[in-house]
Image (cartoon, rainbow, N blue to C red):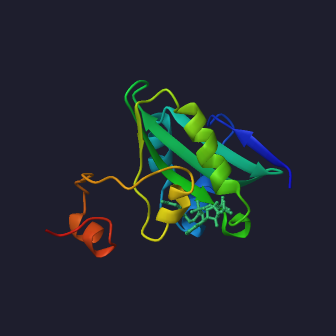
Amino acid sequence: MELNWSYNTDNIDWDELSMLYTIAPLGIKPVDYLKKVLKNSMFKCFVYSGTKLIGAGRVVADGVDCAYFCDIVVHPEFQGKGIGKSIVKQLLSFSKKHKKIILYANPGKEAFYEKLGFKPMVTAMAIFQDQDAAVKSGLVKDQ
Ligand SMILES: CC(C)(COP(=O)(O)OP(=O)(O)OC[C@H]1O[C@@H](n2cnc3c(N)ncnc32)[C@H](O)[C@@H]1OP(=O)(O)O)[C@@H](O)C(=O)NCCC(=O)NCCS
């Protein structure tokens, strides 16, 4: 399968990107949200099969210390073919000068990241805008 890669948003179809997150599924991400988060992301990666957008990911980073991976996604018809792994590897390469690369996995996706070298953090904590929903979905513990 021939894939085409892009590392900026110059030619992105924002509606297609939003739909990719919806069907993956990785939540509802409206176009205005995507424009803002990608503008503020140091690294991004988009994968195309022909002209069809089939994968994406981004990294929020400070250039020295910390890089945060988020919104890694592959179109359902293309999952299980090594594309997600390639996206993460590309973003790891972009982020390699950072002292730490962090992320949180959707529950059930931990093994995908473990195979790419990520280890569970012992003291990681988070404040979500909707803490109750984060507890219900298994992202944080209610202590
Ligand atoms: C998670 C996701 C990005 C993985 O992408 P993918 O292209 O399907 O995964 P790959 O084919 O590159 O898999 C790479 C390796 O991880 C493994 N893997 C993939 N998904 C896995 C899962 N859910 N649990 C355990 N292992 C998994 C594969 O078996 C493969 O192992 P191998 O290298 O030993 O053969 C993709 O399934 C997806 O977009 N899911 C919906 C959105 C989502 O949940 N994103 C992650 C947010 S944290």
The outermost residue toward the bottom is: 136
Drawn side of residue 48 relative to residue 58, left or right = right
In x, y percent, where is residue 117?
Answer: 52, 49
In x, y percent, where is residue 73?
Answer: 58, 57
The outermost residue toward the left is: 143
Drawn side of residue 104 relative to residue 124, left or right = right
In x, y percent, where is residue 135?
Answer: 25, 70
Quarter of the figure with residue 68: top left
Q: Is residue 64 visible?
A: yes
Q: Can residue 27 be seen in this view?
A: no
Identified at 41% across, 50% down, the residue is: 103
Above-or-below relation of 62 to 82: above
Which sits in the foreground, 56 or 97?
Answer: 97
Q: Quadrant of the C terminus?
A: bottom left
Q: What number of labels is visible?
A: 0
Identified at 70% across, 55% down, the residue is: 83
Above-or-below relation of 39 to 82: above
Identified at 62% across, 37% down, the residue is: 9
Q: Quadrant of the N terminus?
A: bottom right
Drawn side of residue 48 relative to residue 102, left or right = right
In x, y percent, where is residue 129?
Answer: 25, 57
Above-or-below relation of 142 to 56: below
Which sits in the foreground, 69 or 27?
Answer: 69
Identified at 44% across, 60% down, the residue is: 105
Assign ligand 1 to one image quadrant. Answer: bottom right
